Amino acid sequence: KPRWTRGTPMTLTYAFSPYNMIDRVSVPEIRAVFERAFARWASVIPVSFQETPEYDRADITIGFYLGDHGDGEPFDGVLGVLGHAFSPQNGRFHLDAAETWSVDFEREASRVAVDLESVATHEIGHVLGLGHSSVKEAVMYPSLSPRRKKVDLKIDDVAGVQALYGSNPNFTFSSLLQSQNSLNAAVGLETGFYKW
């Protein structure tokens, strides 16, 4: 296992359990979701993530499990706890197989569908050592509504993970602020329209 030291560029490997996957979402779609989620975190810290076929040797091991699955934190069925991950250097990343996981709400009609990419992004934060945030917009906020997508890192998420790892040399807070300000402005305009 690599040493998790602040500011040093490093590569962490991740692998999917060959035995604990789900049928509802295809493996290529799951892989694409995780690739995007890991890339989001990699864009702000000097850590890169690489998928490996060697599950037993990967730094981060990902799988879908039902109920009591041997780690002392049993899953509770539909909704409730969606997933959990263990911080460095453990790297175990478990998702509740009972959920109606979705990668596209237009293809998934269920009212209890959960966005896989949103949960993946959140749990990667835990794998990296982050706790929950009290900032409601943050990816690391502890709850997510069904049929809601929440994948963009907010300033609170970035500040937290950079306190642990340092900053990706290509990252600037001004670019994050700019994208959030334009988003806020668009949302503000939208809601302003309906005021009487």
Image (cartoon, rainbow, N blue to C red):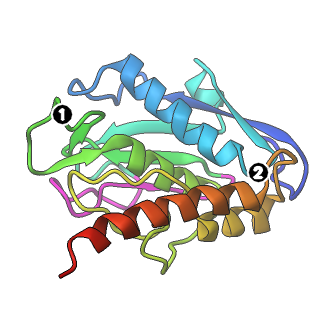
Magenta range: 71-89
Secondary structure mainly formed by the magenta segment? loop
Q: Dividing the image into 4 quarters, which one contains the C terminus?
A: bottom left
- The residue at 34%/68% (across/down) is 143
Specify the quadrant of the image occupied by residue 82: bottom left
Question: Residue 107 vs residue 131: left or right?
Answer: left
The disc placed on residue 177 is none
The number of numbered discs placed on residues in the rendered structure image is 2
Q: Is residue 127 above or below residue 190?
A: above
Specify the quadrant of the image occupied by residue 193: bottom left
Residue where numbered disc 2 is placed? 45
The furthest residue to the right: 8
Residue where numbered disc 1 is placed? 106
Is residue 17 visible from the viewing direction of this image?
A: no
- Image coordinates of residue 126 in percent, x first then y, are 56, 59
Q: How crowded is mark 1: few (under 14 residues within 10 Å), some or many (20 or more)?
A: few
CA distance separating discs 2 and 1: 33 Å
Q: What residue type is labelled 2?
A: Ile
Q: Which of 182 and 77 is in front in this view?
A: 182
Instruction: Specify which label sits upstream in the sequence, 2 or 1.
Output: 2
Is residue 134 visible from the viewing direction of this image?
A: yes
- The residue at 83%/44% (across/down) is 170
Q: Residues within 10 Å of mark 2 (few under 14, many from 20)?
A: many
| Mark nearer the viewer, 2 or 1 | 1
Question: Residue 38 vs residue 150: left or right?
Answer: right
